[in-house]
Amino acid sequence: MRQSKANRKPSIADVAAAVGVSKTTISRYLHGKYDYMSAETKERIDATIEELGYRPNKMAQSLKASNSHLIGVTIANISNPFSSQLLKGIQAECRARGIQLLVSDVDDNPALERAAIESLLDSQVDGLIVNTAGDNDDYLTEFATKDGNPPMATLDRFIKPVVCDCITTDNAAGVDEMLDHLVAQRFDHVVFVTQPAAAITTRVTRVTAFRSYIAAHGAAAGAAGAADIAGAADTATGAISGTISGEVLEYNDLAGLETGLERIMAEQAGRRVCLFSNNEDGMCDIFEAYPAALDGHIGLCAFATKRWARYSGRGITCLDQNPVRMGRTCAAKLAARIYDGDDSPYELLELPAELCIYASTTEV
Amino acid sequence: MRQSKANRKPSIADVAAAVGVSKTTISRYLHGKYDYMSAETKERIDATIEELGYRPNKMAQSLKASNSHLIGVTIANISNPFSSQLLKGIQAECRARGIQLLVSDVDDNPALERAAIESLLDSQVDGLIVNTAGDNDDYLTEFATKDGNPPMATLDRFIKPVVCDCITTDNAAGVDEMLDHLVAQRFDHVVFVTQPAAAITTRVTRVTAFRSYIAAHGAAAGAAGAADIAGAADTATGAISGTISGEVLEYNDLAGLETGLERIMAEQAGRRVCLFSNNEDGMCDIFEAYPAALDGHIGLCAFATKRWARYSGRGITCLDQNPVRMGRTCAAKLAARIYDGDDSPYELLELPAELCIYASTTEV
DNA sequence: CTGTTAGCGCGTTCAT
DNA sequence: ATGAACGCGCTAACAG
């Protein structure tokens, strides 16, 4: 038996009954198909809808239609402030287009990520934005290439080959620009500090760019100790004159980070060293594992938001990725593909990062 | 004409046809109703589902059922890192319960908030978590009391009278604890710095607690200039001995903040002053409008996350609200009400904040 | 200008 | 042990 009508939201049938027309007419009204509708019924419908407080049921609409105006978003780790900025941008675009967001945090867990994506699909999302936790390239690639699946875009990540739209920062250019700055500031040695890079494309890109810059501009530090092989001539890669040595420090936990930093600082005694963190969180880890970093004797810089970096410690030089714009760009691209019939080839979009210089690299 | 079947996801009917049974049997299988099912059909169904990659359509399920396993969340301003922590907690609880999240940022705009809520309702959410932008109490109260609407809970906000579950921090206790600390640190004057408080219950609560503490423990600063009327005796409110004067500084923009702070610092020349910010963002505003705040001559403290506060400036004493726990608590309460038949009276749940002491109040 | 009918994918009596 | 048939709320031919 249908439940006592009293406490259920009115359906299109209720409105139709109240007005004394068929559901079709109401449906037409809802979609602005007034073409052949008498002004009078139109008015009566209008009044009745108002009176009953009728609102169309989106689930029912979506069930009929082939689209839900729903976009699924998976976030590697939503507690990261960077993620919330991404979401802000996604939201802005989606609000403007009347799209709702089904959001799923995956706790840095690839298995959860796969489950979340399946679950979003079950909810009939029209498209997917994936800020992948990493280690899921095979799954994602298969997903993107299998037809029948909705369009997908990766955010702050990419997959190779490019089988979907990928929105990232131009990490290589950012790294180069930062290192140019450090060379200009006469640092002798730079350490790129990062959590394990293997699974996260962004990190790999940065590490690669870092290594190739160092290879071109000076002497890379050997594992057992860095030697500064000063080269007099500029390399082809950069216009800035000067040399710099460097190395990558990957860490899994604070203890490892502490050990690594102590070793490096011992090896580099007497030289001007700068720590280049992969992100804000990493910089906090550095502070925690190696408080001396805050003394002002070491240079510091990071991929980080201006707002955060400006007031951390004495102000930390940063590459701001403008995550809000990244999110917005990503959502716009995806929406165009879904709703505007955009069928351009998939692309890897690399947005520039902004170098913001503060005391941590200039007053050392 | 139904579209060329080829590229559409299989429906329950397809599975039924493939197995050679009716949809009913498949449906039973899906819901674990094996009671009277032959082991053989069961196996065949299992195989076919696997083979076809069939997954039930949640929209269709929800359309029939009275619940969608969808919870709507509106966030006052999602770019705030605090919000992302709230979301983390909400997510954790909801993931555990198989609930999906429809998230909506409302850009600090009450009108957008109302629209977002209506829109979420249209999507048949089973419940609503509202981190209101403020200035919407009438709407929210009406919403909560009108039956037919799904359960709602407010997060980091409350509405009075309590017509729904409200999860907040115990702001009054937090303010008291912080002020006790400042008194112990021999500060003479405290300024509670906040964006306009009127619309946000949290802020009002804090300002009220602040004023009443100051009234009890010392002399409140007059509008035209603060005079320290030292009182020798403890008041009834606190066990800590000592007096402190104080005032509230509300600002609308950086210019206003700068003017206000300059006035106050001039008035309080020679006294030990501490600025008490309502949140992280407010503290950044202070840094921006009044860089001298970073000199170490003024005390600083705030409602803020430990992780942020620890490494901002030289370390800022803070009241950490543990937003992840807040979010989780809120989601758990709401889910219990929706799905577990919890019908206890609505309550205002005030979770304690943790006082974390750093250099900004101890090395001044 | 409006109504009839069929069905989106699924769950659920009720019957067998 | 399994199916037929109806309906959730809505849309879209196809009539008239």
Image: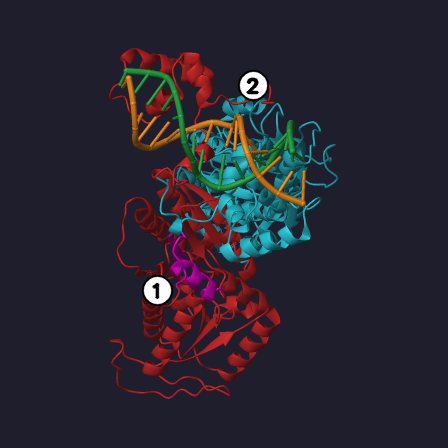
Chain colours: A red, B cyan, C green, D orange
Mark 1 = which residue? A162
Q: Is residue A36 left or right of residue B185?
A: left
Which residue is pictured at 68% across the width and 34% down the height? B231
Mark 2 vs mark 1: give the one in front: 2
Q: Residue A226 carries which label?
A: none
Q: Chain letter for mark 2, please.
A: A
Disc 2 on helix, strand or loop?
Answer: loop
Q: Is C15 drawn above or below residue A154 in the view shown?
A: above
Q: Which of A191 and A155 is in front in this view?
A: A155
Q: Residue A5 carries which label?
A: 2
Disc 1 on helix, strand or loop?
Answer: loop
Q: Is A204 drawn above or below residue A63 in the view shown?
A: below
The part of the image, by quadrant, that contains residue B253 is top left
Q: Which of B234 and B167 is in front in this view?
A: B167
Across and down, in percent, residue C12 comes to 62, 32
Label 2 Cα neighbours within 10 Å, binned few <14 / some 14-19 / many ≥20: few
Label 1 Cα neighbours within 10 Å, binned few <14 / some 14-19 / many ≥20: some
Q: Is residue A304 left or right of residue A8?
A: left
Query: Can residue B72 be seen in the rendering of this structure?
Result: no
Query: Can residue A217 be seen in the rendering of this structure?
Result: yes
Q: Is B96 drawn above or below residue A211 in the view shown?
A: above
Question: Over which residues does the magenta segment extend?
Answer: A136-158
Q: Nearer the viewer, residue B278 or A192?
A: A192
The part of the image, by quadrant, that contains residue B67 is top right
How far apart are the alpha carbons under marks 2 and 1? 53 Å
Which residue is pictured at 53% across the width and 58% down the height? B311
- Look at label 2 and name its amino acid: Lys
- Look at label 1 and name its amino acid: Val
